[in-house]
Amino acid sequence: MSTYIRYETLLFFQSLCTGALLLLFYDLLRAFRAVVRHGGWWTAAEDLLYWVGVSIFGFAYVYQANQGILRSFLLLGLLLGAWICRFTITPLFLKLWIIILGIPVFIVKISIKRLLFLRERGKILLRSMEKSVSRREKDRILPRKRSKQVEKKKKKQQKKNSE
């Protein structure tokens, strides 16, 4: 085999690996989406940025790898590498990254849940303290009112008695 054919064969296998690698990066993005749920607008923006980046990278790779000559077998290698990776590595890779990315998200969710519980518990404690303080104030005010009412009645009775 001539050195030129070996070089092109090597380029084809490199493009297969590059296509698989690009798909694995997209799988990382998919795993992140599975763990951290967000709306359609953010998903579309992420996809747009990813595919613009991949298209620029793919064009630069094909252009640089073959000294400025665009060859269709390199594009075919990128697509074939992604397709092979999709049916072999992707299912396990995606599950693994969902688990790995899920651990810190789970820890953050539990921490937030506990902090919110403590905040709500503090509000309940403050309300109960406020109620007990207001009851004490009512207990102090009521006897005063009662004593004033009793004093008024005594004065009225004294007036009646004195008349």
Image: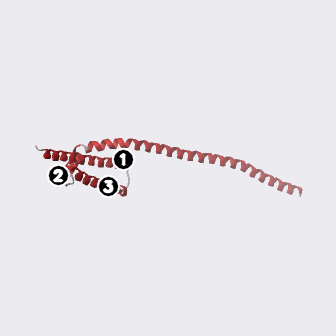
Q: Earlier in the sequence, mark 1 or mark 3?
A: 1
On the image, numbered disc 2 is attached to which residue?
A: 73
Where on the picture, by quarter, is residue 129?
Answer: top right
In percent of the image, x 19 and y 47: which residue is there?
11
- Residue 48 in percent (x, y) is at 32, 57
- Residue 116 in percent (x, y) is at 50, 46
Residue furthest to the left in view is: 1
Local crowd at mark 3 within 10 Å, few (<14), some, or many (≥20)? some
Q: Secondary structure at mark 2?
A: helix
On the image, numbered disc 1 is attached to which residue?
A: 35
In percent of the image, x 53 and y 46: which residue is there?
119
Please give left or right for residue 120 compared with residue 71 in the image: right
Q: Earlier in the sequence, mark 2 or mark 3?
A: 3
Kindly report which numbered mark, 1 or 2, lies closer to the viewer in this rendering: 2
- Residue 92 in percent (x, y) is at 27, 42
On the image, numbered disc 3 is attached to which residue?
A: 47
Please give left or right for residue 149 compared with residue 86 in the image: right
Distance between the Cα atoms at labels 1 and 2?
A: 37 Å
Amino acid type indicated by mark 2: Phe
Q: Secondary structure at mark 1?
A: helix
Where on the picture, by quarter, is residue 71?
Answer: bottom left
* Residue 55 vs residue 59, the one in the foreground: 59
